[in-house]
Amino acid sequence: MARELFGTDGIRGLAGKPPLDSTTAQAVGAALGNWVRSSRQPHVSVVIGMDTRESGPWLAASVAAGLSSRGIAVEFAGVTTTPGIAYLAKNGHFAAGVMISASHNPYQDNGIKLIGHAGYKFPDQEEERLEADIFRLLEQSPDFPQASPRVDSSLDRAYVDHLAATLTGGLHGLKIVADCANGSASNLAPELFERLGARVHPIHCSPDGRNINLNCGSLHLESLQAATIQHQADVGVAFDGDADRALFVSGRGKIVDGDAVLFLAARYLQEHGQLAVNGQPPAVVATVMSNIGLERAFRAHGIELVRTPVGDKYVLEEMLRRGAALGGEQSGHIIFHRYATAGDGMLTALRVFEAMQASGSGLDELTKEIQVFPQRLINVRIKERKPLENLPGVTREIRAAEDSFGDSGRVLVRFSGTEPLARVMVEGPELERVEDFAHRIASQIRAELGG
């Protein structure tokens, strides 16, 4: 069934325009309320959180109004992280959680993410059911009561206490630069790291509603690199807008992406007997975007790399199927299933810092075994989507690249689940060939899809 509202990460769009207008958000709340009632949840309350976008408060109030119209109590965490809402949904007296965020997108966008009582994002079939109910409600043009939820600061405190409790040794002696993307982690991350004994230099921690992700955070690491070197810090960490992902910078300014984090985390878990679960061979779940270099580094340590489609929900589904302890994405969504049901940037940071403290080594040393193959990513704006097999010029260029690289390279072309984009990834041993094939494929997509 084709879905019109829900993408790979909830509902996302331009704030104030359908489907991120007040009326639709109210209908989302009402549909979620209907779901809570019909699914006979033991709780009849929902927790709502948001990032720092200026549209967050009215969208949260709109969802709350829809929930209230169905007799569902609402508790409001205010500015918090997406994994924080997942934690609260699972461990609090809530039937579900709602996060108002568009993650790494610019401030003009926003989104609505739905999380069930188990702490996991709603599966596709549940989103399809909700979507049908949302459209039915919109056709009826109901009059929803207004809602003005008040922030309960104890909700954030419970989440931060949980994170702090996962680290027994503390962070004493560690000097950290934390780039919070002017988003959800702006207050929480510096507070958490300092509480655990680290010296923290925060940057981009002054949200004004419009500067979230603006030339900062996990998509723009230049200022973090400069600040980490300038302050002679041991490590720098950058979050995205809703802090469900984290990327790192070594003390020398080297970027440490999600692949490298998966490697150092897997090795740490393996050394402590926590990677192989239920007698299964050690395995880490990642997506098709992870570099061949990670796969080869894992192979040297007897660790299998299991690949899924792009999207942390698909990584999590495979982790649950296999009982895997660790999984994640190159972009920095890392899932430590012992502690969390979702990718959590602050939790990831604690695990990275823990490995550094235990080994006495920096990130350069901990990730030196990964020989990263050149990889080129190109986003192509498109006017329409068609199956790749119906695009003869594109398939011809893809085959040419695959024939050229053989087993030493990869080509991946996919459509974005949240934006009108075709994403081209080419990976191989030589940068010049990688660049050439990536541009050839992207050019053909422009020609055939009218971007």
Image (spheres, helix red, strand yellow):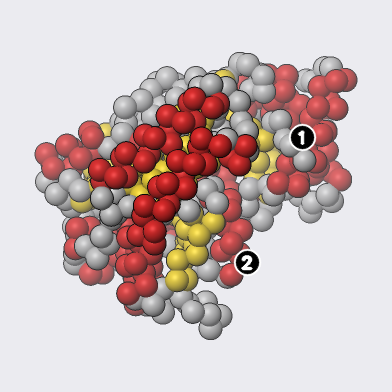
Q: Position of residue 45 (x, y in %)?
A: 73, 42
Q: Which amino acid type is shown beneath numbered disc 1? A: Glu
In the image, is residue 390 above or below residue 41? above
Image: 428 above or below 133: below
Q: Residue at x 46, y 23 (%)?
A: 107
x, y percentage for residue 264? 32, 64
Whole-angstrom CA distance, mark 2 to mark 1, is: 26 Å
Q: Which residue is mark 1?
A: 131
Q: Mark 2 — residue?
A: 321
Residue farthest bottom in this picture: 279
Q: Find residue 142 and report its image quarter.
A: top right
Say if residue 37 shows up in the picture. Answer: yes
Name the residue at 50% across, 37% down. Answer: 394
Which callout, 2 or 1, points at the residue further toward the start of the chain?
A: 1
Label 1's element?
helix
Q: Is residue 188 visible?
A: no
Q: Are marks 2 and 1 in contact (CB under 8 Å)?
A: no
